[in-house]
Amino acid sequence: MAGRLRLPLRLPSLGPRTRKVLRIVGYVVLALVTFVFALQLTFPYDRVKAKLEEALAEKYQVTINEVERGWVPGRVYFKSVTLRTRPTKPDDTVTTVYLDRLGIDVDFLPFLRGAASVNLSAVLGSGKLEGNLTVSKDGTSIAFEGNNLQSQMLPMRDAIGLPMSGVVELEVNLDLPNETGKTGKSAPNWQKAEGDLRIACPSGCTFGDGKTKLKMKLKNQRNQAFAAEGIEFGKITLKSLLAKAEIKTGQLKVTQFETSSDDGTLFVDYMMELQPSFNDSNVVGCLRFNGSPSLLQRDSKTFSAITATGAPLGPDNLFHIKLADKFKDMKRLPQVCGGAVSNKNMDSPGARPALTVQPDQPAPADAGVLPSFPAPAMAQDAGVGAPPSPPVNVPVPGPDMPGSAAGHGSAGSAVIGPVAPAAAAPAGESGH
């Protein structure tokens, strides 16, 4: 613009020594940037692919169709990744997990403080799982979040023994510090861990497909022989599922468990007194469940698989399985969950049990996993006695009835069971 006053730009006066220092710093920065980008362009990511396949080869057959390096240094994408479990026994079910794309982004800055930080992102169909994994001499930090994950594309069958369908949401946060032990070696200490876990199925999740039999993995050879052929199981549908767990002050607790289903009722209470080694942590908990009249009419086989497990019927008209022992040897005992598991009176089962860990006691020699078999003969063998009487319809739980506790079970589902409650069964067979 005509007449506009222009002032000359004046730079600070630099002495010869300052200019020399800045020149050296510039050369160093340019060299580092050049090195990082050259490394990204020449790094043998095909060898990383081979190493990844080799690392997972013991448990998975891994196939990676394509490797693509990103423009940002430290970033690489593996496309069309298939992980197929390797069966260890002839009757093991093979599970396949398929990833459209797996992205790995290495953060170089943490290397300056002796840590390795990797950002991961995986695309599974219409869902996405992303987060960060940081490992240092002080410990491990994990933060992951998954949205719109198709459960049938996840290894759910290995976890629950049945195929699952429906959209799942997942969130995991964990800070696990390391501690130097008596041997002088640094190892994770779970007693000082902090974190939380949330898994949810907003609507329409199912367990079972009407074809796959439920096969339980038991340590006891006799029970495993009976379970070898599997249990006839149809399909259970959940209107919604929300579970939350928290890790702090040396404990892992399930803080919230909500389900809604027309097929039955389920309550889960679980707590662990953490030890430095996770497998040595002490477990205390209770599973309470029952089928519904609509499930009996729709699928009697599945109803039998749920109600004829050998678990005793508690005063809340729900079948009980008590969880106990160390995590690595956790036992599912056919016992009513009373004061030994919680300080709640089971005659008033509407409220959530407040779990308390009992002093360590040696488990009975014959205590162990409760085998899940629909046949009445198996129920007798498990210690229940006579097979359950024919079920009767019971009204939908109200404020003073089982299943009415806010935040637990399916508030709108009916609870059914034998006419007369069964006595608490003796401990079952040893197993897991």
Image (tube, rainbow, N blue to C red):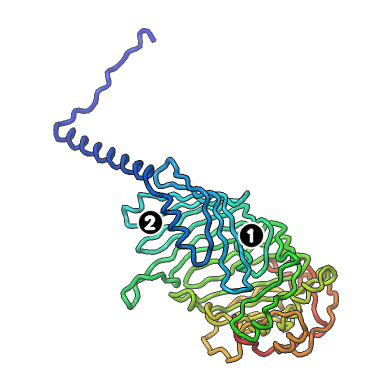
Instruction: Name the residue type under label 1.
Output: Ala
Residue 164 lies, in percent from the top left, at 68, 62
Query: Which residue appears at 36% of the width and 49% of the height?
Result: 108
- Outermost left residue: 16
* Foreground pick, 241 / 406: 241
Question: 104 above or below 292?
Answer: above
Dot 1 corresponds to which residue?
Answer: 200
Dot 2 corresponds to which residue?
Answer: 116
Residue 315 in sight from this viewpoint: yes
Residue 351 lies, in percent from the top left, at 68, 73
Inter-mark Cα distance, 2 to 1: 30 Å
| Element class at badge 2 | strand
* Foreground pick, 11 / 299: 299
Question: 26 above or below 47?
Answer: above
With 162 as the anchor, is 31 left or right in this view?
left
Q: Quadrant of residue 430?
A: bottom right
C-beta proximity under 8 Å, tags 2 and 1: no
* Label 1 Cα neighbours within 10 Å, binned few <14 / some 14-19 / many ≥20: many
Q: Quadrant of residue 10?
A: top left
Residue 342 in sight from this viewpoint: no
